[in-house]
Amino acid sequence: MPATSEIVAPGLAAVHAAIARYYTGTLQAHGATPHGVDWANRPTQDLRFVQLLKLCDFTAPFSLDDLGCGYGALLAYLDWRHPGAEVDYLGVDLSTAMVDAARRRWRRRRNAAFAVGPVSPRVADYGVASGIFNVKLDTSPARWRRFVAATLDRMHATSRRGFAVNFMAPLTRGMTGIAGLYRTPPGTWRRYCEQRLGARVEIIAGYGLREYTLLVRRN
Ligand SMILES: C[S@@+](CC[C@H](N)C(=O)[O-])C[C@H]1O[C@@H](n2cnc3c(N)ncnc32)[C@H](O)[C@@H]1O
């Protein structure tokens, strides 16, 4: 039987497997901490959640898919900054070890579940993904763009109101980059979401990190 990733995104199983291996390694090295999901620290991890959640209307209950959830740090952020919010949360991650860690950490949390995979298995009001397009390792740029496109397609298909994702911005002239990271200007995937997905896109930038967030709303 083909792997789930072959069904939802043909040709991308090797990319998914490499991502899962990489983040299983960071988790083993640093545990369920910001470093364990390759972030520098908790404040910047949270700063990304602030931007992504600008998509959501917190005045009413909603369901939320967190693609590339890691150990479920977004739940801690929600409990801290939106304590009264009724959010039906599903975290999805390619790394089984990451999902195991998330399940352990949040076993007593109401309205929270986790699944292993490259896409959400359900349709929710909103989908968010923080940091899933950054580390491309030695995947070719063309294949990484196919991975990004396939993932955006699925996020669009599984979110009723919209989805939000972040990307690393290009370096300015004279800066030296780290090999294996994917950086792209906002126009590339903004156009994709507008023209291919028929969505409305808002770009959030200037929040102190060399990156930006796309809020992609259904028309
Ligand atoms: C940089 S970490 C961020 C984790 C979490 N979003 C956070 O901010 O704490 C990226 C996570 O996304 C997962 N990931 C990357 N691409 C994915 C995909 N297409 N589907 C599911 N998980 C993915 C990785 O396994 C990793 O755990």
Image: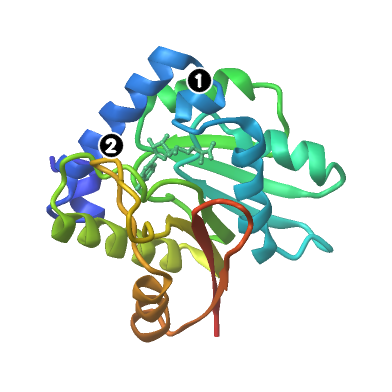
For numbered disc 2, what is the local secondary structure?
A: helix
The quarter of the picture where residue 180 lies is top left
Question: In screen coordinates, is 8 left or right of 215?
Answer: left
Q: Which amino acid does label 2 sit on?
A: Ile
Report crowding for label 2: few under 14, some 14 to 19, many 20 or more residues within 10 A (C-alpha).
many
Residue beneath label 1, please?
A: 101
Which of disc 1 and disc 2 is earlier in sequence? 2
Mark 2, mark 1: which one is toward the viewer? 2
Q: Which amino acid does label 1 sit on?
A: Ala
Mark 2 C-beta to ligand 1 under 8 Å: yes
What's the mark number on residue 19?
2
Residue 98 lies, with reference to residue 113, above or below; the image says: above
Determine the CA span between mark 2 and mark 1: 17 Å
Across and down, in percent, residue 207 comes to 63, 57
Q: Compare residues 58 and 212 and report the one nearer the observer.
A: 212
Q: How is the image coloured?
A: rainbow
Residue visible at 49% across and 15% down in the picture: 31
Locate the N terminus and report the quarter of the image it occupies: top left
